[in-house]
Amino acid sequence: MVSDRIADIWGTRTPHARDTPWPVRVDTHLDASLTERDVDRWVQSACVLCSNGCGCDIAVKDGRVVGVRGRAADRVNRGRLGPKGLYGSWQWSRTDRLTRPLVRDAGGELVESDWETAMGRVVERSRQLLATDAGALSHAFYTSGQLFLEEYYTLGVIGKAGLGTPHMDGNTRLCTATAAAALKESFGSDGQPGSYADIEATDAVFLFGHNMAETQTVLWARVLDRVHGPNPPRVVVVDPRTTKVAEAARATGGVHLAPLPGTNQALMNALVREVVHKGWVDKEYVAAHTLGFEELKATVEPYTPEHAADICRVPAADIRRAAEVFGTSERVLSTVLQGFFQSHQATAASCAVNNLHLLRGMLGRPGCGVLQMNGQPTAQNTRECGADGDLPGFRNWDNPEHVRQLADLWNVDPMTIPHWAPPTHAMQIWRYCEQGSIGLLWISGTNPAVSLPELARIRKILRQDSLFTVVQDGFLTETARHADVVLPAALWGEKQGTFTNADRTVHLSDKAVDPPGEARSDLDIWLDYARRMDFRDKDGAPLIPWSDPRGAFEAWKECTRGRPVDYTGLTYDKLRGGSGIPWPVNDGAPEGTERLYADADFPTRVDTCETYGHDLLTGGALSEQEYRAANPDGRAFLKSVAYVPPPEGPGEDYPFVLTTGRTAYHFHTRTKTGRSRQLRRAAPDVWVELSVNDAARLGVGEGDVVRVESRRGAVQAPARIGRGRGGVVFVPFHYGYWDRPAADGTSRAANELTMTEWDPVSKQPTFKAGAVRVTRIADATGPSPAPTTTASAPADPDGIPPTVGGPDADVHEHLRATAPPTPGAAGRPAPDATTSADETKG
Ligand SMILES: Nc1nc2c(c(=O)[nH]1)N[C@H]1C(S)=C(S)[C@@H](COP(=O)(O)OP(=O)(O)OC[C@H]3O[C@@H](n4cnc5c(=O)[nH]c(N)nc54)[C@H](O)[C@@H]3O)O[C@H]1N2
Ligand SMILES: Nc1nc2c(c(=O)[nH]1)N[C@H]1C(S)=C(S)[C@@H](COP(=O)(O)OP(=O)(O)OC[C@H]3O[C@@H](n4cnc5c(=O)[nH]c(N)nc54)[C@H](O)[C@@H]3O)O[C@H]1N2
Ligand code: SF4
Ligand SMILES: [Mo]
């Protein structure tokens, strides 16, 4: 069957009943005019355009990538791929890539150079700075959630044991820092409790600030296949916009709660209060496995549905109904993402979701998962490997024994490993750069000149003479244009490595083709730096003994031995041929682990836990003594806090609340998706979404150009008269300047508007609420460029052409008649003819 997957984002339905396996549907998209018979080789991989981590095979012809196909055997996607995976995962590979290192010449221009010169300059600056009083504190690394595990671990060892700098973080700070923080605060350690297979077993799906329909499209197809089958789950969503998820909530008899951005915590307190007041608490579970119930009860007591309704501006009856669905469903699966994570009480609100599950005893059983989601494909590994500043293997920087374990493993003095203070979070790293105490900032796999808040400030920092910036990317991004040295990176398909998705499933991605020109993998670049810097261990041997991905993976396995994030049972060979495998994988669980905490034994013991915890209001850290006194002993924490209003609310000068986010067709700053014909056509440019009533009051019609201004900057774009709640303006954050310079004097990046504020515990910036005003600037020349197939659908579709892909968007969907492997089996289904790795045309 052929389908236009721009017009039909989720593809053909394969409905099924509760507790039956999710059927297989294999999606294939090849370059126009090619068929599967033309493909020379299929190389095993997984998609890196979101945290879902769909297993796929890369089609290679004449040494080039010509398409992709979903892997039927994979537990994550059973063969499916979404629009980004199908059209966006590979077309960029033959466009304007960086092929040689660039350095600044005497005139200040970036010019092509060679590796010797470029690395020479990096090492020279590095040595110079290390010789100053600041020492290693002059060095900072700002990395990604999109590289491979082997690369992060290598970077982590360089930073912690080679240089000894605490200034290392990922763009994961903007992304999933709150997922990690909420898991640590509630359960003692990072690590996703739930499994995607919970979708097959659940009776209700709660999505907290998560537009899954657009941001994990294949996971949403999985939910839709239940929704369209017998005994469907009810969907409940908390989101100010009318997303496709919100439509499903209505259709399934669930609830769409559309709170004013910035008020999640008030709503969560009310939901928890209802569950407690109505007696829906599993008292035995709470008594045996949790701490803090009485405090929780007291904290939420003032939040009657009416009180929360007042703050959030939603009907009190809807809050009651949502609580009832949670309280009376046999099994509930919850997902949490940026609508919660990117707000000022992010960790508190996300912990409240954990609380609901703990109160109902809904963890570790089929259908009862919590997914504190990731966003980026490899964000989990950034966290696991310590490339976000944490210590590798979910170790606690405040626990001397954990530091000693690493010192032993790396054969270095424990004092080399920074652990005298918490690791420096990204927002603080940028502040130190601004103040001049950091002299070398090495940016890899992220584009902060578009993705950080308050862009005018970020540009100013990047231009500072006191800061030497290295940018490692596949493209000349907005950020790379500011760099002193640009290093051309090999990207997905051009290198080998592993990565882990949001439900702990580890995938191997093999190298399919050579990188362009002189581009090198991030691993090779960092190994080269380590060699040139001559980092040594205590005995004078090279600090990093490995020289390839497999060697790095084997070293990483040792680092995880005995930790909750145990990889010791995995090998590259084991990851080939079948499905990805969820960690922990070890002697006790050789085929992986579907769900954590089935035994309700949480990693909260003093010698195990990753943190001693924080005050959710202030972010103040608790001491080991305080933690010990609480005596958690394997029990989970019910942590809570009162609601406080967001740092910037609407007022007279700036009467609207701004929120920002995504569309289904683009990934972040579009370095990949903006180079795909089909995706670019589907969502060509920025727009501003206004509610029907707000637009009428402002005299704005569809497509009229409006100016959105905050205290920090302005964006100009055509308006979409959408279906969101009143008082809220939405701007997608995908559109920077690489493909359309701001020469006309207007800005189009949403982050011109956003502010430098963050959650006190996770330090994640608050991209989801700020105050703006909106002015009409010019008449429409046509409808706005917003897609019609998504949350940005127009309130009145009349006269607005629907978003379609056209002939070059054809995708083959192959529905399997044969029974798929049983879901829930963490092990590997037997590989079949269409999914074996690296199959050669013969
Ligand atoms: N198509 C696509 N998919 C992606 C990505 C992409 O760029 N494009 N990026 C990936 C990454 S890294 C991430 S982190 C994820 C993000 O995935 P999501 O979190 O699903 O995406 P967002 O659009 O950022 O935000 C989700 C929703 O939060 C809502 N929201 C805004 N303010 C509030 C609020 O105050 N409260 C509540 N409850 N909701 C609010 C928005 O209306 C929006 O619909 O997506 C991943 N998948
Ligand atoms: N206003 C607003 N801002 C936001 C958000 C929001 O919702 N609203 N969301 C935030 C979130 S959740 C995220 S995750 C960030 C994302 O923000 P960024 O990380 O800045 O976005 P990307 O465009 O994904 O940038 C990744 C870069 O890495 C490069 N790259 C890809 N693969 C590799 C590789 O293997 N090696 C190297 N060296 N480079 C590689 C790509 O070409 C690209 O330039 O944006 C954040 N900013
Ligand atoms: S759902 Fe995510 S991982 Fe799967 S194909 Fe789409 S972008 Fe790729
Ligand atoms: Mo993200």
Image (cartoon, rainbow, N blue to C red):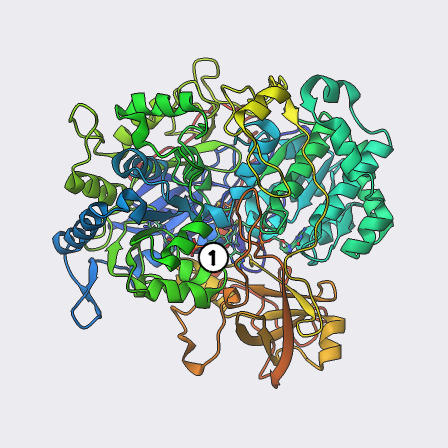
Question: Number of numbered discs present?
Answer: 1
Q: Position of residue 191 (x, y in %)?
A: 52, 30
Task: Residue under label 1, please give it.
Answer: 668
Secondary structure under tag 1 reads: loop
Q: Position of residue 13 (x, y in %)?
A: 63, 45
Outermost front residue: 133
Residue in the image at 59% along x and 33% along y: 185
Residue neighbourhood size for the residue with mark 1, other residues' Cα within 10 Å, grouped as few (<14), some (14–19), many (≥20): many
Residue in the image at 55% along x and 25% along y: 594
Compared with 720, 179 (above or below) is above
Tell whether circle 1 marks a residue whose Cβ is less than 8 angstroms from ligand 2: yes
Q: Is residue 577 visible?
A: yes
Q: Position of residue 726 (x, y in %)?
A: 74, 66
Residue in the image at 60% along x and 18% along y: 634
Name the quadrant where ligand 2 sits. bottom left
Tell me: 280 left or right of 74. right
Residue in the image at 34% along x and 25% along y: 406
Outermost top residue: 588
Q: Amino acid at mark 1?
A: His
Task: In this rendered view, identify the residue nearer to me: 316 or 237.
Answer: 316
Residue 331 figure quarter: top right
Q: Quadrant of the C terminus?
A: top left
Q: Position of residue 778 (x, y in %)?
A: 59, 86
Compared with 652, 193 (above or below) is above
Tell me: 234 left or right of 67. right
